[in-house]
Amino acid sequence: MMNGPNLNLLGTRQPEVYGATTLSDIEKLCNNKAEQLGVTVDFLQSNHEGVLIDAIHDARGKYDGIVLNAGAFTHTSIALMDAIKSVALPVVELHLSNIHQREEFRHQSYISKVAVGQICGFGAAGYPLAIDALATYLGAAT
Ligand code: DQA
């Protein structure tokens, strides 16, 4: 579970858009879902593109897939797209908000071009949904 820039501020960051749930609350939701499904989930949040790229590289051979909320890097980062393509791990793209209903610049996603699919618009509830989606894709759900 990788979270990009500014998502460490969830809970206080534009709650009218992103809700009042904090990232550590979200981590609990994800752990509950993982336990339910009999899978393991680890977390990373970084405000730095290079750290996320390194983590995608390091995931190879260690994880079966990635859920990625790349924050604003979604709309700008060819480097993240290339990293995903390079490691050939399944990625579920995730956003709290429905990016398609927001400003035009959020409609473009470099992650979508290489992701298995996208979940957006369900707020914090999207996180366990994304784990479900990835586990189903991997045939890992028990
Ligand atoms: C976001 C949507 C992005 O457009 C924005 O830059 C974010 C959060 C979301 O979860 O809704 O930082 O990825």
Image (cartoon, rainbow, N blue to C red):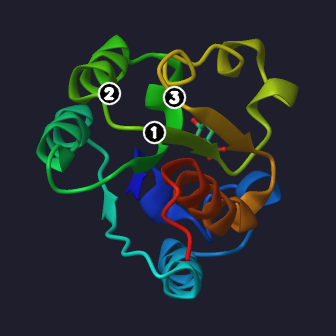
Q: Quadrant of the N terminus?
A: bottom left
Q: Amino acid at mark 2?
A: Ile
Q: Quadrant of ligand 1?
A: top right
Q: Are marks 1 and 3 in contact (CB under 8 Å)?
A: yes
Side of 50 relative to 22 (left or right)? left
Crowdedness near tag 3: few (<14), some (14–19) or many (≥20) residues, C-alpha within 10 Å: many
Determine the CA span between mark 1 and mark 2. 8 Å
Vertical comparison of 77 with 6: above or below: above
Q: Give the residue number, with chain letter if any, for mark 1.
A: 91
Along the viewing direction, whichever of 131 and 120 lies nearer the viewer: 131
Determine the CA span between mark 1 and mark 3. 5 Å
Q: What's the mark number on residue 84?
A: 2
Q: Are marks 1 and 2 in contact (CB under 8 Å)?
A: yes
Q: Quadrant of the C terminus?
A: bottom right
Along the viewing direction, whichever of 15 and 116 lies nearer the viewer: 116
Q: Give the residue number, with chain letter if any, for mark 3.
A: 115
Q: Amino acid at mark 3?
A: Ala
Is residue 48 visible in this depiction of the protein?
Answer: yes
